[in-house]
Image (tube, rainbow, N blue to C red):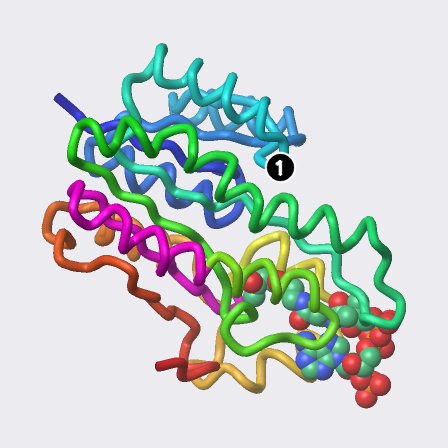
Amino acid sequence: MARVAVVTGGTRGIGHAISIALKSKGYRVAASYAGNDAAAQKFQADTGIPVYKFDVADFDACAASMAQIEKAVGPVDVLVNNAGITADGMFHKMTREQWDKVIGTNLTGLFNVTRQVWEGMRARKFGRVINISSINGQKGQMGQVNYSASKAGDIGFTKALAQEGARSGITVNVICPGYIATEMVKAVPQDVLEKNILPTIPVGRLGEPSEIARCVAFLASDEAGFITGSTLTANGGQYLAS
Ligand code: CAA
């Protein structure tokens, strides 16, 4: 029986590549999205992967939608917490709304979604939780106090939950991508990207979404069963975290 994988934010960007990679490895995949109906419908038509619309920042919506997914696709074996947003701005200009929405999606979203599948994984004695953090959760980034705090929180979440899941056959790991060629990075002002970011990436280019998807596929596999609580850094050498 094929394993079931859920990818939040799985219809665009890095999540799009993760959904496709897991499907190609034989998983039954469901992808969530929050707002872009047109992209989600195109993704579903192109890939045959069912899409579910809910906001990971909304606990009750997560409970209802994850139950719906488990009923339609099956109990979740692999959860990829990929949904993430930015609302960049210098701290002296940052609003409460920019703070709340980034923390709500990028950090509280991990609680809201993972909580729905955790008891089932414990009962079945198997699970893979893979969180997508960021280089900027490791090193901090000017203009991203909210985002960096949320992504650093994802790393702490991973390390704590890994210890709880270990005896139940559940691994919990976090991937920290660097700057990947997605709409999120393309939204960075061109001059900032060219002057401040690209020159600091030793491999001399942005990463590709598929390069992160391959990391996810590995961590989801049986071969990665001894790896838990770990932080997998994939950033082209831009920040050498231990
Ligand atoms: N690295 C280094 N310097 C940066 C920088 C960065 N990422 N972002 C901004 N700066 C510098 C600017 O070059 C500028 O320097 P100068 O005054 O010497 O020209 C200074 O900071 C102020 O920047 P702005 O003039 O752009 O100020 P602003 O108030 O108009 O805008 C901002 C501030 C919204 C933060 C804008 O600069 C910006 O969007 N920066 C990019 C921030 C960033 O790196 N975001 C990552 C998004 S991708 C992502 O988050 C995915 C991931 O996980 C990696």
- Crowding at label 1, few (<14), some or many (≥20) Cα neighbours within 10 Å? many
Relative placement, left or right, of 170 versus 188 is: left
Where does the C terminus fall, quadrant-wise? bottom left
Relative placement, left or right, of 153 versus 144 is: left
How far across and down, in percent of the image, does residue 218 sit? 22, 53
Which residue is denoted by mark 1 in the rendering?
57
Number of labelled discs? 1
Where does the N terminus fall, quadrant-wise? top left
Q: Give the amino acid type for the residue marked by disc 1 in the picture.
A: Ala
Can residue 126 be spotted in the picture?
Answer: yes
Relative placement, left or right, of 226 versus 133 is: left
How far across and down, in percent of the image, does residue 231 sit? 34, 66
Q: Magenta includes 158?
A: yes
179 and 108: which is toward the camera: 108
Q: In this view, does 148 lie above or below 51?
A: below
Q: In this view, does 142 lie above or below 16?
A: below
Q: Is residue 224 above or below residue 81?
A: below
Magenta stretch, residue numbers: 155-179
**Quadrant of residue 149 within the rendered picture:** bottom right
Determine the residue positioned at 62% across, 31% down: 58
Q: Which element carries disc 1, helix, strand or loop?
A: loop
Q: In this view, does 238 lie above or below 45?
A: below
Determine the residue positioned at 36% across, 57% down: 160
Determine the residue positioned at 49% across, 41% down: 111
**Quadrant of residue 137 within the rendered picture:** bottom right
100 and 18: which is toward the camera: 100
How far across and down, in percent of the image, does residue 169 sit? 16, 43
203 and 104: which is toward the camera: 104
The quadrant of the picture showing ligand 1 is bottom right
Q: Going by the picture, which residue comes out furthest to the right?
A: 93
Can residue 190 be spotted in the picture?
Answer: no
Determine the residue positioned at 86% across, 57% down: 95
